[in-house]
Image (cartoon, grey):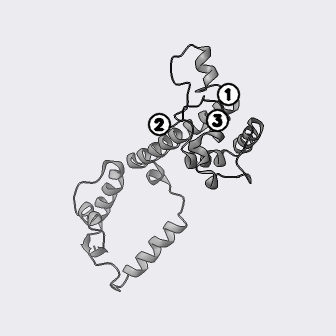
Amino acid sequence: MTNQINQSDQSGLIVAESGGTAPTSSQWAFLQIHRAMEAYNVKTRWAPGHMKIVGNELADQLADNEAKDPHQPYGMAASPTRSGIRTVGRRLLEHTRDTWWKDKSILMIRSTHGDFEWYHRKFNHEDTSKCLCGRPKTPEHLVFCKRATTHFKKWPLRPIVPPRTRQEGLAYLAQLIDQPQEFETFVKVTNSFYNE
């Protein structure tokens, strides 16, 4: 049996390979490493990174190559880890939360159903039928509100002059609604859609 020495600049890896506790998400991999280290008498020790230690620069290059063009994992390595599942779940939740309001805003403008004056009158609501500027909430009010017109120079797909008529306002909104990213930009720039 020959002695092998594994040099690493990752202290966490050394602790885990030297008998420390392995994370539950990849414990199977650490257990395999422990068995192989015992069978082949492999020892692990810390080596400072980027110090021209023989083999270390090659290991760094191989790791960089794998990171840029990863091979398809197989066996247990192809199984997701708990941490990976949590990360994907968190990203999906954030994406869903972000897109939900965007989708609802565009739908309310298109259908004129939602937080608008006529809707509140229809259902006899006592308040929330006025914009924060004091004017009635209508779909086209988004472009006529003082809160929006003060930011006119930042409007996406900006017309030469601000809309002056209901027809011009609705035409501009229709242009934005056809390009949801631009509508989102408009809402952010103008702090619109009746945000408090």
Element assignment for label 3:
helix
Q: x%, y% of residue 104?
A: 60, 33
Q: Is residue 196 above or below residue 45?
A: above
Question: Label 3 belongs to which residue?
Answer: 141
* 175 on left or right of 1: right
Q: How far apart are the two marked residues, 3 and 1, measured between alpha carbons?
A: 12 Å
Q: x%, y% of residue 170?
A: 74, 37
Category of crowding for the residue at label 3, using alpha-carbon neighbours closer than 10 angstroms: few (below 14), some (14–19), many (at least 20): some
The amino acid on which the numbered mark 3 sits, given as a three-letter code, is His
Q: Which mark is residue 80?
A: none
Task: Say which quadrant the N terminus sits in.
Answer: bottom left
Q: Earlier in the sequence, mark 1 or mark 2?
A: 1
Q: Nearer the viewer, mark 1 or mark 2?
A: 2
Residue nearer the viewer, 165 or 51: 165
Q: Which mark is residue 196?
A: 2
* 41 on left or right of 161: left
Q: x%, y% of residue 179?
A: 70, 46
Question: Label 1 belongs to which residue?
Answer: 112
Category of crowding for the residue at label 2, using alpha-carbon neighbours closer than 10 angstroms: few (below 14), some (14–19), many (at least 20): few
Residue occupying the point 65% across, 41% down? 143
Q: How far apart are the two marked residues, 1 and 2, measured between alpha carbons?
A: 20 Å
Q: x%, y% of residue 90?
A: 44, 44
The amino acid on which the numbered mark 1 sits, given as a three-letter code, is Thr
Q: How far apart are the two marked residues, 3 and 2, measured between alpha carbons?
A: 16 Å
* CB contact under 8 Å: marks 1 and 2: no
Residue occupying the point 50% across, 21% down? 127
The amino acid on which the numbered mark 2 sits, given as a three-letter code, is Glu
Residue nearer the viewer, 98 or 148: 148
Q: Earlier in the sequence, mark 3 or mark 2?
A: 3
Q: Is residue 180 above or below residue 20?
A: above
Element assignment for label 1:
loop
